[in-house]
Amino acid sequence: MKKKTLSFITAMAAAAAMVPNVISGTAHAEENSLPASCDLSSTYLFPTINNQSYGSCASHSTTYYQFSYEARKKYFEKTGIVPNFSYDPLYTYNQINYGIDEGSTIVNAYNVLKNKGAVPYGLITNEILTESEYEQLSEVEKLGYYSRLYYDRQNDVYYNKYIANHNYIVNDMQTKCEALKVRLTDVHSKHMLFLDKEHDLNVLKSWLNDGKVITTYGDFKYEVKENLRAAKNPYNGKTEYALAKNVHSDDDPGHAFTIVGYDDNIACDVNNDGYIDEEKEKGAFKIANSHGKNWMNDGYLWVMYDAVYYASEFSELNGKNSAGLKRVPAFSSNLFYTIDVDFKDVKLISEAEIETSDFYDIDVSTYNNGHIVSIDNNVYATESDHNLKSEALAYNGSIISDITELCDENYLNGSTFNVKVHNHGEDTKINVKAIRLRDDKGNLVAEKIIDDDTSEDEGYVCDIIKSISLDIKPGDVNYDGIVDDSDRDAINSYISGDIYSFSLLQQDIMDIDHDGSITEDDITSFNELLN
C-alpha cells in the first residue's frame, strides 16, 4: 500500500547521498552554562565561503549563508542525512536591488525567501568582463552590462569591471515552483546596544549555542590596518586576524555579514600596550564574510568583544583614529536576525502572467472565502526609497504564489480563486496577460487568457482582479478534462512505485475513495467511474 501525499522532504531524502558525518542536535543553552566556544561554521551544515563580487552582501548573508545553513539543518533533522545544497544569493538580490547594483536590505531579502523561497546556487551567473573585453563588444551588447569600480589592494590601484545580469529575474516555471518548497517561516530580531555587556553578549552566544547563525549589518571598516591585531587561535595554533576597533566613514554604505561562532579564549593586545589583559582583551565573535577565501582568516574574521561594545574598555580607543574617523561598535546597526526555515508540501500554485514597466511596483495576491495569500515585490518602504532607483525594471513574465493554505477539503470541486494584481507606481504600466493554476511540479491545471490590454488604458491602473476556477473530475490525473485509460495507467504506475513522477495535487486526485491512501481500491473505484 502506498500512502498518498508524498512530501517534498521525503522525495529529497530518497535521492540524497549520505555524508560521513554526524551532527547532534543542540538544546537551548542557558546563559549561566554557556560553553567557552561555539563554531557553527565548522560543521557540514555551513556553506563554504563565497565571494560576492557585486553589491549583494545582504543576499549573501541571508540567502547563501543563513538560509542555506538553516535549510541544511532542517533537512538533517528530518532525514539524518547531511546535504550539500546551497542557495543562490542572486535569486534574491536581483529582485531587491532597485534595478541597479548598489546594495539592498536584509528585510527585503527575507521577504523574497518567505514568499518565493530560493533556487540552487549557481543557477544564475553574473558574467564579469575586464575593460578590454568590454570594449570588444558591439554598442548594442554593451547595453547589457554596467561598470563597477574595483580596488586592487595588493597593487593599490582602482580599475573598472563590467557586470551583466544584475537585474535578471528567474522566469523558468519549474524552477520557481521548486523554490516554493523550501521557504523562510519566521524572522526573529533583537536590538541591542551592548550597554549591559555580559547580558547582550550572552544573548548572541545563546542563539549560536541553539544552532542559529546570526545576520547583522553596519559600518564595515574592518580592513583598516591599525584596527587589526594578531590573535593566537588556541585550537589550531594559527595566528589569525582579529578586529580590535571599528570606525565610521560617511562614504561607507554599510555591509551585511553573518555571525557564526564565538570563543572566550581568543586573545589579542586590543590597546597595543604590549600586554594582554585577561579580563578585557579576551573573547571574540567569529564572522563569515562574502569577500572570498583570501579575505582575512580564509574568509572569516574574529571580532573582539571589546570592539562590539558601545564604548571600549580602553578610553584611548574611544576617540578618533589617525584619519579622523570616530569609533563605532563593530556591529553598529545594533540589529541582529535569526530565521526559521522549513520544507513545504505545495499542492496548488496561482500564477499571474504580467507585462509591466516596473517589476518592483507590482504586488500579487490570491484569495477565496475570506482568506488571502500575498506576494509583495514592492521593496520601497518610503517615498525616498522609491527615488533611490535610477531606472525601472521592466518585466515580462510570471509571479507565482503557493496557495495551498486556501485549499479546503473540497478544493478540487468548483473552487474559485480571485487573483489581484496591485500597481504601486502611478507612472508604471501593467498588463495582465493570463492567470493560471499549477501543481507543485509546474504542470498546468487551469488557465484563463486575458484579452483586455490594461496597459493601453488612460490614466493610472491600480488594481486588476481576475478570477479562475478549479473543477477537476474525479480520477482526471492528467488534468485534460477526460477520465480515461491514461489516468488509470497513471494510478497503476504510482501504486507500482513510480511515486516521484506525480505532484501532491495528482496524488489527491488518485485517492478516489478519499481514505488517505492510494491502493488497488482506488483502481476499483476508478473503474466504477468509467462504467
Image (spheres, rainbow, N blue to C red):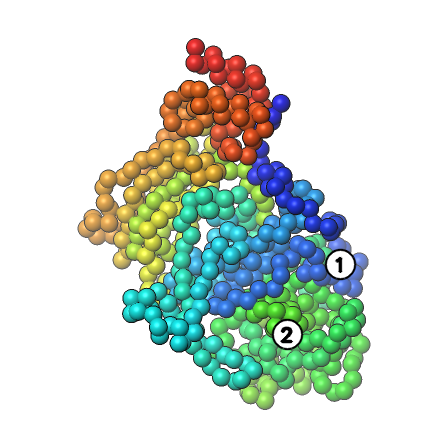
Q: Disc 1 marks which amino acid?
A: Glu
Is residue 4 found left or right of 377 in the rendered image? right
Tell me the amino acid under the disc marked 2: Met
Asked whether residue 387 appears in the rendered view, the answer is: no
Residue 296, disc:
2
Residue drawn at x 42%, y 68% as measured from the top left: 163
Quadrant where the C terminus lies? top left
The vertical placement of 317 against 507, above or below, is below
Q: Residue 73 at what x, y percent from top left? A: 65, 50
Q: Which mark is residue 31?
A: 1
The single residue placed furthest to the left in the displayed view is 458
Residue 316 lies, with reference to residue 329, above or below; the image says: below
Nearer to the camera, 493 or 36: 493
Q: Would you call the spot at circle 1 few (<14 residues within 10 Å), some (14-19), or many (20 or more)? A: some
Percent x, y of residue 405: 49, 36
- Left or right, 16 with respect to 128, comes to right
- Residue at (25% x, 52% y) in the render: 460
Front residue (pair 46, 215): 46
Give the x, y percent position of residue 303.
67, 72
Task: Say which quarter of the image contains residue 467.
Answer: top left
Residue at image location 39% in from the left, 41% down from the top: 351
Question: Residue 392 placed where, x, y %?
Answer: 33, 61
The foreground one among 311 and 499 is 499
- x 67%, y 86%: residue: 316
Separation of marks 2 and 1 at Cα, in angstroms: 30 Å
Mark 2 vs mark 1, foreground winner is: 2
Near mark 2 (Cα within 10 A), the count class, few <14, some 14-19 or many ≥20, is some
